Image (cartoon, grey):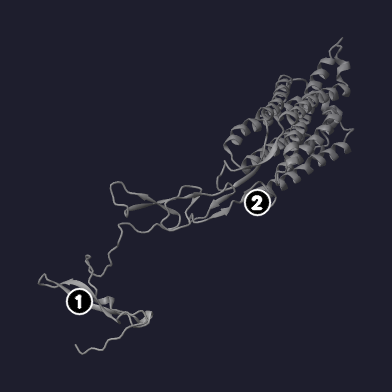
Amino acid sequence: MGKEIYFDENGDLSTIYRIVNWQMNPDGNVIQSKIGSFSTSDALDKAMILNSSLIVWPTEDQQQVPRSVCSESCHLGFRKSAMQGQPSCCFECVPCLQGEISNQTDSFNCFKCPWDQWPNYEKSRCLPKPFEFLSYEDVLGATLAASSFISSIVPLLILKLFIKNRKTPIVKASNYSLSCLLLVSLFLCFLCSLGFIGYPEQKKCLLRQVSFGLVFTLCVGCILAKTIMVVFAFMATRPGSSLRKWTTFRVSYSIIFIFCLLQFILGVAWLSIAPPFAQYNTNIRPELIVVDCNEGSPLAFWTMLGYLFLLATISFIVAFLARRLPDSFNEAQFITFSMLAFLSVWVSYIPASLSAQGKYTVAMEIFAILTSSWALVMCMFLPKCFFILFRPEINSKDNIMRKN
């Protein structure tokens, strides 16, 4: 044919191929339209010449390239799911479930993250879970810590006021020694809430609930001893009464000691049988690691609160029955209001703590501690401080005994 041919190093002929596109003309006949070429003799990057604008595709607009499958590829974070009654090339892209990732395109399976990791937003890789606990750096924790510290100063100021005016009738009538012990216990009540803030270490978990139970038992025990002393003091004034010997400070301190001893025994039994411990909790919020204290025995925790509730209830009932005693022993009225407020706070705490989660459970208990302590301070001491500071003319023996 008059053409020059030659062979390559493999003994093959050097060939140029036409690239054609089968197209249908207006007459309905199929023609082969040349759209490019491929040469076996040229370098690989220059071997193909293609004019894609000349291609006519068998799609609706003739410019859209048809897909070789009936489904798009599944991106990261998705997995393939076969469509019933469809070919294997047809599938659905299903998002990975919570806590699972897919780090490959067109993956058939999703993989669970380790317990201490959680998927990113795209569910393409696992990231370390953040830790959550009520810390001093947190706004809520810092606010509660500041409130606890500032509140603890108030009983000390009242104690200083009582010591300075210990010989005045109002301070004497309120049982000076028990009032001082009660103020010290209230100071400890405010401070014990600080043990619930910060990283829950093992020692902190062991001591925080037990110390809370002991200081509040001391506090409520002082109020109950005050109530009993009010009743004894009134009954001892009757002619021929043998109760005068029961109105000494030794009796009141013995009552407080017995109440605290029972709470101490309960705390020791709790720490011996099922002590609290620190734990990493992933059940509350799976995307976080909540660091909290497991109380060890919920029965022991609620028994401790129940014991406090019992003491407060007894004190409330006795004070309520003694509220109409002569005005010289009118502290029963203050005790009635203080115990009513105390019981209201802790009864409200029960449903609130059960509905809260994570660090907010701890915050609810701290709030209950601060609120109940403030209720005792305001109901027991605020009226007395007002009269001592602003109405000193009332703070006289005649007014206390109502002999004017």
Evaluate whether residue 353 shows in this view: yes
Q: Residue 113 in the image: x percent, y percent?
A: 54, 49
The local crowd at label 2, few if under 14, some if 14 to 19, many if 20 or more residues have their Cα within 10 Å, is: few
Side (left or right) of 365 relative to 401: left
Which is nearer the eye, 14 or 27? 14
Which is nearer the eye, 227 or 349? 349
Residue 205, compared with residue 77, is above or below; it is: above
Amino acid at dot 1: Ser
Q: Which residue is mark 2?
A: 139
Do tag 2 and tag 1 residues touch (Cβ < 8 Å)?
no
Q: Residue 251 in the image: x percent, y percent?
A: 86, 21
Which is nearer the eye, 273 or 284? 273
**Cα gap from disc 2 to disc 1, whole angstroms:** 74 Å
Residue 23 position by quadrant: bottom left
Label drawn at residue 337: none
Evaluate whether residue 404 shows in this view: no
Q: Earlier in the sequence, mark 2 or mark 1?
A: 1
Residue 97, compared with residue 260, is above or below; it is: below
Q: Residue 221 in the image: x percent, y percent?
A: 78, 27
> Which residue is rendered at x = 61% and y = 51% of the image?
130
Amino acid at dot 2: Val
Q: Which residue is mark 1?
A: 33
Q: Secondary structure at mark 2?
A: helix
> Which residue is rendered at x = 66% and y = 32% of the image?
346
